[in-house]
Image (tube, grey):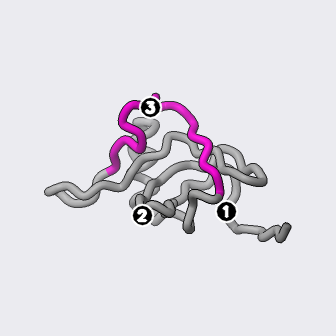
């Protein structure tokens, strides 16, 4: 199996595009060979006030880590600094 190294590492806040077209922002908790463990993933949603962060899973524990198979991810990248700050504020209450 081909191994590709990535500049993304555990602890990074990333924007993830799923094969379903959804986009979410999460912190990478753990990287496995076949999956990523995402800490408190939030969906990017459009509202009348602009883009907002909302629950990734409506009925799931909002504090739970989610194991995402690598086959479910189309691509991911480092999150823009302003959105990463909003993610940190939404998940920790710390205002940056």
Give the alpha-carbon distance from disc 3 to disc 2, as whole Å.
20 Å
Q: Residues within 10 Å of mark 3 (few under 14, many from 20)?
A: few
The residue singled out by tag 2 in the image is: 21
Q: Residues within 10 Å of mark 2 (few under 14, many from 20)?
A: few
Q: Is residue 53 left or right of residue 64?
A: left
The residue singled out by tag 3 in the image is: 60
Q: Earlier in the sequence, mark 3 or mark 2?
A: 2
| Residue 46 x %, y % | 25, 58
| Residue 85 x %, y % | 43, 53
| Residue 3 x %, y % | 82, 68
Q: Quadrant of residue 72?
A: bottom right
Task: Report the magenta residues as a range.
Answer: 53-70
Q: Is residue 20 above or below residue 30?
A: below
Residue 84, label in figure = none
| Residue 58 in view in this figure | yes
Q: Is residue 76 above or below residue 31?
A: below
Q: Is residue 55 magenta?
A: yes
Residue occupying image coordinates x 57% and y 36%: 65
Q: Is residue 39 above or below residue 81?
A: above
- The furthest residue to the left: 48
Residue occupying image coordinates x 40% and y 36%: 93
Q: Quadrant of the N terminus?
A: bottom right
Q: Which element type, helix, strand or loop, lies under badge 1?
A: loop
> In front: 9, or 18?
18
Are the residues flagged by discs 3 and 1 in contact, CB closer than 8 Å? no
Give the alpha-carbon distance from disc 3 to disc 1, as whole Å.
26 Å
Q: Which element type, helix, strand or loop, lies under badge 3?
A: loop
| Residue 77 in view in this figure | no
The residue singled out by tag 1 in the image is: 8
Residue occupying image coordinates x 36% and y 55%: 44
> In front: 83, or 66?
66
Q: Which element type, helix, strand or loop, lies under badge 2?
A: loop
């Amino acid at each position: 199996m081909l191994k590709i190294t990535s500049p993304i590492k555990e602890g990074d806040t990333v924007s993830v595009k799923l094969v379903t077209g959804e986009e979410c922002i999460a912190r990478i908790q753990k990287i496995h060979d076949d999956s990523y463990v995402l800490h408190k993933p939030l969906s990017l949603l459009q509202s009348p006030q602009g883009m907002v962060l909302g629950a990734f899973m409506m009925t799931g524990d909002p504090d739970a880590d989610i194991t995402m198979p690598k086959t479910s991810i189309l691509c991911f990248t480092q999150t823009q600094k302003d959105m990463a700050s909003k993610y940190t504020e939404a998940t920790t209450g710390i205002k940056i």
